[in-house]
Amino acid sequence: MGRVDGKVVLISGGARGQGAHEAALLIDEGASVMIGDIRQEEGSAVATRLGDRCRYVPLDVTDESDWERAVDATLDTWGRLDVLVNNAGIVDMTPIEDTTREAYERIIAVNQTGTFLGMRSVIDAMKDNGGSIINISSTAGLMGVPGVMAYSASKWAVRGMTKSAALELARYGIRVNSVHPGVIDTDMVRDPNVNSHDADAACAKFPIPRIGRPEECANMVLFLASDESSYSTGAEFVLDGGYTVGRF
């Protein structure tokens, strides 16, 4: 697995779940990490726990000015920005006939528009030295999934935006890839207010018969942040236990 010595990383949604695991692993492998999140108490606690090479900045990914402040804070602290992980995301497990316009637009604002704003905000900081943008999509961005209309729409959009950005930003040496996790063992997946299904039972039917671990997503992010993935851009990287391979 690739080292990221000296690289500076900005992670949205880094206060818990996959984002916090990504931050911890990247720091272990030599990076400095700015965590951006709306959860100030949790984000500050993670930054304190991870030590001197981690900082927290308030970040609402739907707010352009928050993105500007997050990038400025990263540059002011470490003088460079090499990697963006667009990790922040929300889900609403509601059938289409019961999904309100407001709920739909909220998912799009965070998952889709937030990813767009994040990519756009780091371009100038990465132009001179190149960089890696890692957009966290989902298996719901690769195949139809019932009951998550808005989430699916946003994650398919992240997949498409990744490919367009990869083509546009290649001239600056900026690589852009998407990561597509399946069911990962996080607070959001375990929250009965978000997911009423038995995640472990569902995953037991997969070719790899278990739920995914957050550190497995972090390992993929580490690879894409490192120079070991230097020939990969515009691509999808899937972590789903074989869920999207076919019927089983």
Image (spheres, rainbow, N blue to C red):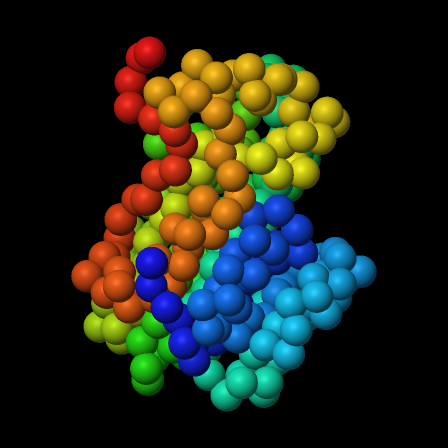
In this rendering, the answer to whether 152 lies above or below 96 is: below
Taking the spot 22% from the left edge, 72% from the top edge, the residue there is: 171
Q: How many marks?
A: 0
51 or 109: nearer the viewer: 51
Which of these two is toward me, 151 or 74?
Answer: 74
The residue most toward the right is 41
Looking at the image, the residue that sits furthest to the left is 231
Specify whether 110 is left or right of 26. Answer: right
Q: Is residue 237 left or right of residue 140?
A: left
Q: Residue at x 29, y 18 (%)?
A: 246
Q: Quadrant of the N terminus?
A: bottom left
Q: Which x, y percent locates residue 58?
A: 70, 66
User: Residue 66 at what x, y percent from top left?
Assistant: 64, 68
Residue 20 vs residue 2, the one in the foreground: 2
Question: Is 200 rendered above or below residue 121?
Answer: above
Tell me which residue sits at (40%, 32%) in the image. 240
**Which of the image's four quarters has the C terminus?**
top left
State the image coordinates of residue 25 (x, y, percent, origin top left): 51, 60
Image quadrant assignment for residue 233? bottom left
Is residue 25 visible to the viewer in this orientation of the structure?
yes
**Residue 91 appears in view:** no
**Residue drawn at the location 43% of the way across and 80% of the way down:** 6
Q: Is residue 134 left or right of residue 17?
A: left
